[in-house]
Amino acid sequence: MTLWSVGFDRPGAAAEYVTVPAADLAAKPVSVDHLQAAAVPLGALTAWQALHEHAQLASGQHVLVRGGRRRVR
């Protein structure tokens, strides 16, 4: 079985370690545990993927967000 056979379409999607520019990082608050901190970007990344990759949202278009306080399931 290769990485590509399980549905990942981006190299490194299942990597244990990755490198990123320091400017893209933020410090984790002491009051937040590692599991909670890891989940923070999930909603934003899911919305980004839905709007830009699936809905093909273009510059100048608008989106109405309803139920913005709900979580991604």
Image (cartoon, grey):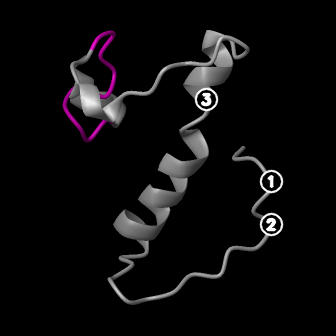
Region in magenta? 8-17
Queried whether the magenta region covers residue 9, the answer comes back as: yes
Q: Earlier in the sequence, mark 3 or mark 1?
A: 3
Label count reads 3
Picture coordinates of residue 52, whole percent (x, y): 38, 67
At a point 75% along the width and 62% down the height, the residue shown is 68
Separation (CA) of disc 2 from disc 3: 19 Å
Separation (CA) of disc 2 from disc 1: 6 Å
Magenta segment, principal secondary structure? loop
Picture coordinates of residue 69, whole percent (x, y): 80, 56
Give the quarter of the image for residue 7: top left
Q: Is residue 44 above or below residue 18?
A: below
At a point 76% along the width and 73% down the height, the residue shown is 66
Q: Toward the viewer: 53 or 9?
A: 53
Q: Which residue is mark 3?
A: 39
Q: Are marks 2 and 1 in contact (CB under 8 Å)?
A: yes
Q: Which residue is mark 2?
A: 67
Q: Earlier in the sequence, mark 2 or mark 3?
A: 3
Q: Are marks 3 and 1 in contact (CB under 8 Å)?
A: no
Instruction: Assign the N terminus to one quadrant of the image.
Output: top left
